[in-house]
Amino acid sequence: MKYIFHFSLSILLTASLAVKSQTSAALQIIPKPSLIKEAKGTFLLTSRTTITYDNELAANKAKFLSGILRRSTGYKMPAIFAKHKSKNNIHISISQIKEKHKEAYELLVDNDAVIINAVDTAGLFNGFQSVLQLLPAGILSEKSIKRASWPIPAVSIEDSPRFSWRGYMFDVSRTFYSVSVLKKYMDVMSLYKLNTLHLHLTDDQGWRIEIKSHPELTSKKTTVFVGKQEQPAERSGYYTQEQIKDLVRYAAQRNITIVPEIDVPGHAWPIVITNPQLGVNKKLTPDYVFPFLDSWQYWGFQFTPNPLDPSKEEVYTYLADVFNEVADLFPSSYIHFGGDEVVHRLWESEPHIKAFMKEKGYTKIAELQSYFVGRIVEIIRKKGKKPIGWNDILDGADNLTKETAIMSWLGAKAVKNAASNGFYTVATPTAPLYFDITQHDRNDGTMSDLAYGNINSIDEILKYNPTSGLTKEEEKYVLGVQANIWTALPQEVKDVNVQNFPRLLAVAEIGWNKEETKNTAEFEERLPKHYSILDVLKIDYFTKGGYIAGKWKASDLSTNFKTLTWDVSKKVYANGRIMAGFFYTNGESSLKVKNVKLLENGKEISVDNHESLADKFRGTHKTKSFLYYLKVDNYKPNAKYTLSADVVGEKGTDSEGNVTFNLSPYQPFIITEASKN
């Protein structure tokens, strides 16, 4: 007999309303379950606890859970076949439950057992994640923790997601991140039931995936920042096809689909500099990739001056090679082809493009874009995959197949445009789901894109409803939601983590919960437990104040250069790279900075000599001269660390502002700033 449990909706709703606060031990799960009832009692996970499964389909998931629990508890925790539960047992079952969604599950915890039922292994896995969150945070430790038992509060849950696509996009082109970093992110995503990892694998700043038919795409000039743009070695590189296969396997174990993106016809500098004949013009300066922030220096704006040539047949032959290999590597039903931010004036100015348009009978450049998009869509479809692109591809796309999905980044209008025209869409608007945008204070030193004026706070995320303004019919076309991070400014793993967390948990909440059940205050009551989890996982997260280490005020300044100092001992906690900054907030005149030093017990250990203004403008050109780069290579735990700067009022002495200081350890996920404080 299989242990199947059902609760009437009315009974559970009544019970849920009777619960005083979501802060009780049993009710701190993120995302909040659809229906949850707290019960009396506690299940104690001990060295005698077993994990059982009643169906071979569930065997791998049972063994996966066993491995996680064994790592932190040190218990043997065998996973064995059994038709039904026993005492002191975690029992998982492929069973018929009320909700038929493949990710749905039912969870029952009492004094004797933990039972997870689901119609599919994806649901079983989600049930595991809720169990892990019910346990003390230490259960996620990578090291064994000695305890006599681990309590799980008694609870009954019926749970299923609102959306099938609950995603996170990681830009690994502008800054490269190792396989281990991506795996860590998938660990966290799965814990919070996020099921789609969108990898932005190519852009003007780098090509990050091996294409065996075109090895030039992963040459040094397309994957490494060199010369005066040289950066730490770990920010350069690419994924081999074997590494991609490993990532795909790792994702599948965690109920995650990896969606790859190859961005064309714009954002394709690596293709053009290695295959100049595929570009629309002869502009190849420089003929190597470089950091995003240098785009204005070379090109005068942020976009490539040489997109792919839509009139050349060899472009499509080349891209077919690329997309065919990508499609073979990723089991995802969707392949992303970008299609965004093509600088059309670069097509419009070329005589041979004008001739091609005339030959085709095109009078608008949008028709040419649509032609290119149509060709790429067919390449992807021939591989049995569904194409997906940024919402820019809808411009002039009257003949675009409805099989093409739209990633809507330009707000509610873009979602509406896609859904009303019968295209499936993923809602990922810049406001509030771009995580390289400030989350609290534009002057707190976190690595945010200050070209945007909006604040993408947790409150704004939780308020966001991707189906707002849609008809019931149009709502059916919304696949889900996705947060994006572009790694032009937040490059260090620590900075990326601070930009993502805890905001990514809020995305999990809105992707899973129905609109009528969202509650910002309740969500924030649940967060402390999850800060503890992030601490155990060695993941830094945003706290109010960001990277502010001190301030300067008008009374500190003189008409001559003087040295100001700030104690940063609490912010130095490991060997690593440091970014110090000066964020002007008040006054008629700005602050001029001559140099910045880091002192250890009064002795200089690192210095950055360059003059800058802590000015008001931090806009689209993204020049960051008011940031200073230092390092610690021989950290001493008991030393006093002091930040020192030679400064003067620019034209007067009335300015005020924030002094920011952030150390990023050379090795991520080993130690966090919170561990020092």
Image (cartoon, rainbow, N blue to C red):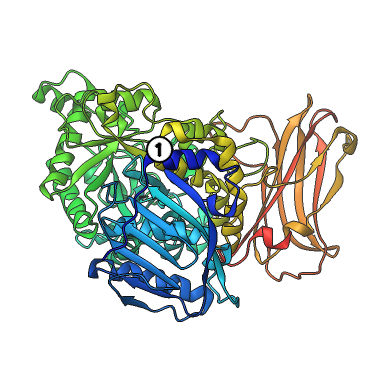
Where is residue 458? Give x, y as percent.
55, 38
**Residue 64 in the image: above or below residue 409:** below
Q: Is residue 424 left or right of residue 128?
A: left
Identify the residue position indicated by label 1 in the image.
10
- How many badges with numbers are in the image? 1
Where is residue 14? Give x, y as percent.
47, 38
Quadrant where the C terminus is found in the figure: bottom right
Crowding at dot 1, Cα within 10 Å, few <14 / some 14-19 / many 20+, comes out as: few
Residue found at x 53% / y 67%:
139
Return the residue found at the far top.
Answer: 363
Q: Is residue 517 something one can see in this rendering?
A: yes
* The one of 596 and 520 positioned closer to us in this rendering: 520
Quadrant where the N terminus is found in the figure: bottom left
Q: Is residue 485 something one can see in this rendering?
A: no
Residue found at x 25% / y 34%:
424
Residue found at x 45% / y 81%:
76
Residue found at x 31% / y 57%:
4
Where is residue 549? Give x, y as percent.
76, 48
Q: Is residue 526 left or right of residue 488?
A: right
* The one of 169 and 120 positioned closer to us in this rendering: 120
- What secondary structure is found at the residue carrying circle 1? helix
* The one of 210 and 44 positioned closer to us in this rendering: 44
Q: Is residue 501 left or right of residue 370?
A: right
Where is residue 208? Give x, y as percent.
35, 56
Residue 484 is drawn in which quadrant? Answer: top left
Residue type at mark 1 is: Ser
Residue 255 is drawn in which quadrant? Answer: bottom left
**Residue 566 in the image: above or below residue 479:** below
Residue 669 is drawn in which quadrant? Answer: bottom right
